[in-house]
Image (cartoon, rainbow, N blue to C red):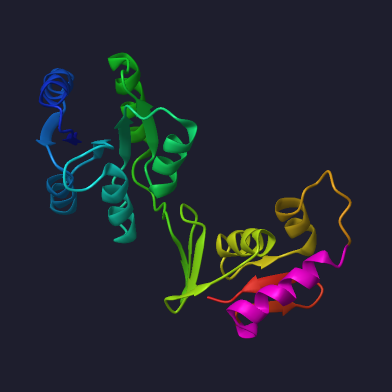
Amino acid sequence: MRLLVVEDETRLAGALRRGLSAEGFVVDVAATGPAGLDAARHGDYDAMILDVMLPGLSGYEVVRRLRAEQRWLPVLMLSAKDGEYDQADGLDCGADDYLTKPFSYVVLLARLRALLRRGAPRRPAVLTVGDLCLDPARRRVTRADAEVVLTSREYALLDYLMRRPGEVVSKTELLDHVWDASVDTAPNAVEVYVGYLRRKIGRERLETVRGAGYRLAT
């Protein structure tokens, strides 16, 4: 198994190289964001351990660019930033796991093994259907590169539909997943918001399948 470690702290990078090599991994080390991005693009690696605070390019931006290029190398992100929003940012950018410093080497190995077992299935950080793009990390939607301003409910509805492109999604399913189950929602709420959404993304993009539900055209 070949691993790429992107870490600018020389002592930690050396310790990771020695420890992982002792476990039987072949380990390459990069010390900057641009160097790590280049290595990930051109090397045949099974996983990457990626620091967040790097010279030249942050770990967030490295993984974001890899996912935008549809490169699905499993990424374990390391950071001294231990806030819940910091961890959410890393995962939303496309990382597969997030471990805060200081960390247990035993836990790092266990999480790395879990990543390697899962492999590298397609896991886009940005949803794309035709000329529609939805970036969950930035909560930003564009159509043909022009920004589409949505309310929170319209955004949630589009997010759900974009995760099932070409599939027929029933009104009941939309009510269950987009609306708060604890609130009594009028049955026609889905129709109302589908209408709002159509005006913003194009009527032809969101089809009504009579008696079954709605389908986002691909």
Residue 144 vertical placement versus 104 (above, below): below
> Looking at the rendering, which quadrant does residue 168 occupy?
bottom right
Q: Find residue 29 and report its horizontal and vertical position in percent.
A: 11, 35
Residue 137 lies left or right of residue 4; in this view the side is: right
Residue 195 lies left or right of residue 145; in this view the side is: right
> Looking at the rendering, which quadrant does residue 194 occupy?
bottom right
For residue 195: magenta?
yes
Residue for point 32% across, 45% down: 60
Q: 172 or 190, which lies in front? A: 190
For residue 52: magenta?
no
Residue 93 vertical placement versus 194 (above, below): above
- Residue numbers of the magenta segment: 187-204
Does any portion of residue 212 appear in the rendered image? no
Total marks drawn? 0
Residue for point 71% across, 75% down: 196
Q: Find residue 95 and report its horizontal and vertical position in percent.
A: 37, 42
Residue for point 71% across, 55% down: 178
Q: Find residue 151 and report its horizontal and vertical position in percent.
A: 65, 64
Residue for point 13% across, 48% down: 39
Does any portion of residue 181 appear in the rendered image? yes
Q: Find residue 103 and report its horizontal and vertical position in percent.
A: 32, 18
Most common secondary structure along the magenta stretch:
helix
Location of the N terminus (image quadrant): top left
Residue 79 vertical placement versus 124 (above, below): above
